[in-house]
Amino acid sequence: MISTSEKILDVAQPLIVAGGYNGFSYADISDAIGIRKASIHHHFPTKAELVSALVDRYRQQTALGLKSLQEQFASPTDQLQAYVNFWQACIGDASLPFCVCAMLAGEMPMLPDEVASRVRAHFHHLAGWLTSVLQAGAEQHLFRLDQRPHEEAQMLMASVHGAMLSARAFDDPGMFAAIVKPQFARLLVADR
Amino acid sequence: MISTSEKILDVAQPLIVAGGYNGFSYADISDAIGIRKASIHHHFPTKAELVSALVDRYRQQTALGLKSLQEQFASPTDQLQAYVNFWQACIGDASLPFCVCAMLAGEMPMLPDEVASRVRAHFHHLAGWLTSVLQAGAEQHLFRLDQRPHEEAQMLMASVHGAMLSARAFDDPGMFAAIVKPQFARLLVADR
DNA sequence: GTTTATCGTCCTACTAGTAGGTAGACAACA
DNA sequence: TGTTGTCTACCTACTAGTAGGACGATAAAC
């Protein structure tokens, strides 16, 4: 038992991940779930609303996921490791080969405002989470940070997004780990 | 005296940089340079050919630019610094706020093959250039590399692309330097 | 307990506008 | 005379979005 609007978002997400905001149409979704275009408009009157809802859901899932990482792993090292492993798995099995918001961020200049602001919020949230993990790790002398936690978090986030892009450009899922793992290792005190 | 086909590419480039492959149309170009859509088809019969030509030109400019950096600066340190400064300036004055190929790489799964292969070639070329600079710098004991030059090059390239994305997501050009400069500094022997 | 009204969902059929692309005429020019 | 570039005029396919109605479920009114 899964609602139609959920099904719509389920179908839309991989399409957005593959081609961005302009990379899919109501017709694509219509074909995929066997429902008329007009019915999609019933659930999501405009495309901007559809994508906004999609990003809202994605952000909610992300928030839950990050929170559960913090509950599941006590050590900041393990938390960060688990975060990286999560993306490695997603890219590896192609279940989510790219972050929805990273994809949309590339198209920022032409996104509807309501979508752009949500994408930006995701970036803020993720940066905040990474900052808190890095800060905690630094306080526990697990990480050695060259910059302040917030700057290190931005660097790490950029690395992750850049690594996703390279994995895609080279059509090589392994590229993600090849880039991010050493970046992560660099933070560890033990390695120096 | 600038040829029409050059003008077409000049107009198409910022449109692609803003919205990707599906983010512009022949009509957009037509409006911008005061020429009919059909005339654009005369120069570039298909959209895939237009974008392929655009990427070819971009790659050529990149090759020239990177070569001139190597001629202009003797030290690998300065070469890398100049490369970073170049992008910092482009993003700062919004003349080229994103790499054409990084933009297209995000849409890789739905690009025409002829475009995708060219984008991939750009990534290979840039990674190769960075590798050679890093290697030279390591041999001269200017850089201290934790990984092999090729891996370090991939990491640096990903950082640059991720930093572009963050600058765009946060609508903050300064974000690029804030991410890339420390990453660059980390390579320098003097800093340790 | 049956009727009545409302709501949510989905439908067919349609709109105006845009997508990439084509055919053929015309003019300048070598 | 043929080539190059531009034009008008058009095409088909597709875009997001709308109008209005059919259907079933649910709930209130009698």
Image (cartoon, coloured by chain):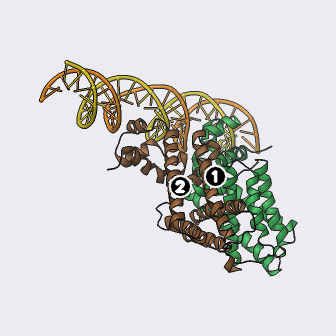
Chain colours: A brown, B green, C orange, D yellow
Q: Residues within 10 Å of mark 2 (few under 14, many from 20)?
A: some
Q: Nearer the viewer, residue A1 or B61?
A: A1
For the residues tagged 1 and 2, is the chain the same? Answer: yes
Q: Which residue is mark 2?
A: A63
Percent across and percent down for residue A18 are 51, 54
Query: How many labels were placed on the picture?
Result: 2
Q: Quadrant of residue B34?
A: top right
Q: Nearer the viewer, residue A149 or B176?
A: A149
Q: CA distance from mark 1 to mark 2?
A: 12 Å
Residue B19 showing in the rendered view:
no
| Number of the label disc, if any, that sits on residue A38 | none
Residue, x 53% and y 39% (percent of image)?
A48
Percent across and percent down for residue A29 are 42, 46
Q: Is residue A26 above or below residue A77?
A: above
User: Contact, CB < 8 Å: mark 1 with mark 2?
Assistant: no
Q: Residues within 10 Å of mark 1 (few under 14, many from 20)?
A: some
Q: Quadrant of residue A82?
A: bottom right
Q: Nearer the viewer, residue A109 or A65?
A: A65
Percent across and percent down for residue B69 are 82, 65
Q: Is residue A135 above or below residue C7?
A: below
Q: Quadrant of residue B186?
A: bottom right
Q: Chain of mark 2?
A: A
SS of the residue at dot 1? helix
Percent across and percent down for residue A65 are 50, 59
Q: Nearer the viewer, residue C17 or B147?
A: B147
Image quadrant occupied by the N terminus of chain B: top right
Q: Is residue B160 above or below residue A112?
A: below
Q: Which residue is mark 1?
A: A124
Image quadrant occupied by the C terminus of chain B: bottom right
Q: The residue under label 1 is which amino acid type?
A: His
Residue B101 showing in the rendered view:
yes
